[in-house]
Amino acid sequence: GGAQYHFGSHRYAGAITGDVTYDSTKLRKETVQYVRGFDPSLWSADPMVTVVEGVAYRKGEVVDTTDARGRVNGKQVIANQEAFDAVMSLAGRLTAEADK
């Protein structure tokens, strides 16, 4: 068989099941509250970073992110060599496990 890769934490993956039940009224209400309370400046104050096995790699070049119209909407940290090496190490281990 082919290799399987799982992205996200074990807790996140464990929440995804074939039996999905939800309270649509509650979900809608909580979503509206979140959107109304969202502070878009957080996307600049706390930029996107590479996360490998729970470790956030925050060192590297900080660049702007843009929306579909090219407007700046936040920041991200471009992975440095340390982050790249961590990603490659994990990918190598996942590939080796999948090939067993």
Image: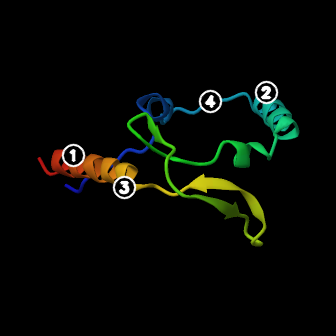
Residue bearing mark 3: 81
Q: Secondary structure at mark 2?
A: helix
Residue 46 location (% of width, % of height): 66, 42
Q: Name the quadrant containing residue 72.
A: bottom right
- Mark 4 Cα shell of 10 Å, populated few (<14), some (14-19), many (≥20): few
Residue that numbered label 2 is attached to: 26
6 relative position to 41: left or right: left
Question: Disc 1 versus disc 3: distance between alpha carbons?
Answer: 18 Å
Proximity of marks 4 and 3: CB atoms separated by less than 8 Å: no
Q: CB atoms at circles 1 and 3 under 8 Å apart?
A: no
Q: Is residue 24 above or below residue 68?
A: above
What residue did someone put label 1 on?
93
Of badges 3 and 2, nearer the viewer stands 3
Q: Of circles 2 and 1, which is in front?
A: 1
Amino acid type, label 4: Thr
Q: Is residue 15 left or right of residue 84?
A: right
Residue wearing tag 4: 21
- Marker disc for residue 65: none
Badge 1, how many Cα within 10 Å: few under 14, some, many 20+?
A: few
Q: Residue at x 32, y 47 (%)?
A: 86
Task: Work out how far the residue at label 4 is from the one at label 3, CA to CA, in angstroms.
Answer: 43 Å
Q: Measuring 18% from the left and 44% from the top, which residue is drawn there?
A: 97
Whether residue 50 appears in this view of the structure is yes
Mark closest to the chain's N terminus, 1 or 3: 3
Q: Are marks 2 and 1 in contact (CB under 8 Å)?
A: no
Horizontal and vertical percent position of residue 12: 49, 33
- In front: mark 4 or mark 1? 1
